[in-house]
Image (spheres, helix red, strand yellow):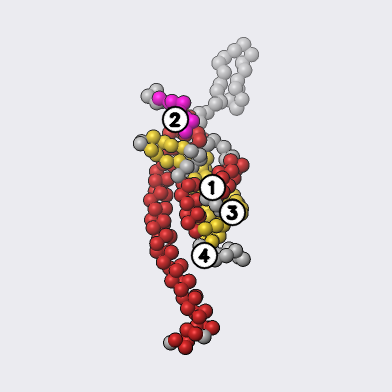
Amino acid sequence: MSTLLRSPKGQIGAVVAGGLLLLAAMWFLLVAPQQSKAQALDTQIATSQADLATRRLALVNPSANVTVRPGDLFRLTKALPDGQDMPGILLDVNRLAEKNGLVFQSLTPQAQVVGAGFVEQPLGVIVQGRFSSVSQFLGDLRSLVTVRHGRLDARGRMYSVSHVEIGTPEGVGKFPIVAAKVTVNAYTFSAPVPNPSTSTDQSTTSGPSSNSTTAAGANP
């Protein structure tokens, strides 16, 4: 056994085995707990997203018993804006990447998903840096909109994260330096489209007159 460890192949094998053990330990200590937290946060995001859409719909067509304060409207509009604002999304992602010491490499918009009162805009984001910094970056994105003491706290627009792929960057160090391909979802408010079946028939027939004029389409 000692002779095998003294050989170059044995030493390389020991280093590789040690690296694999380190990666496995990092997975169980860092990634697995973060996945559980991510699932809980995604559930909270879905609930908050539905609540935001409901509140914004109430603002579009307020009933008599709805009281809207300027601060509520401002926070709702900030969390769920009316427009896509791609430059604003780029600034958000770049700002949070720099805050956590990451290199923001690219952002690629994907096909939109229309929901009830909102539009989901998936974005393919690639960042590079320390594994722990990537985790913090994703947490910062999801916590831009939260609920504190029963009130909406919006420090930016609402984002969720639906996919994370961790890889090793080419030619740049070793673990814990990683390249992360992330699917980030940005949300935009969308008012419901009226159902065409509920529209009333606008054709009418005029009453009798001296020149016997009738509405278009009526039999004379």
* Residue situated in front as seen by the camera: 150 or 213: 150
Q: Amino acid at mark 3?
A: Val
* Mark 3 or mark 4: whose residue is earlier in sequence: 3
Q: Amino acid at mark 4?
A: Phe
Q: Which residue is mark 3?
A: 103
Q: Which residue is mark 1?
A: 99
Q: How far apart are the alpha carbons under marks 4 and 1? A: 21 Å
The magenta-colored residue range is 67-75
Vertical relation: 203 (above or below) 196: above
Q: How far apart are the alpha carbons under marks 2 and 4? A: 44 Å
User: Label 4 crowding class (10 Å Cα cut-off): few <14, some 14-19, many 20+?
Assistant: some
Q: Mark 1 near mark 2, Cβ–Cβ under 8 Å?
A: no
Task: Tell me: 24 left or right of 171.
Answer: left
* Mark 4 or mark 1: whose residue is earlier in sequence: 1
Q: How far apart are the alpha carbons under marks 3 and 2? A: 35 Å
Q: Which residue is mark 2?
A: 72
Q: Amino acid at mark 1?
A: Lys
Q: Which residue is mark 4?
A: 175
Quarter-of-image position of residue 103? bottom right
Secondary structure, mark 2, is helix
Q: Mark 3 near mark 2, Cβ–Cβ under 8 Å?
A: no
Q: Residue at x 51, y 48 (%)?
A: 185
Closer mark to the observer between disc 1 and disc 2: 1
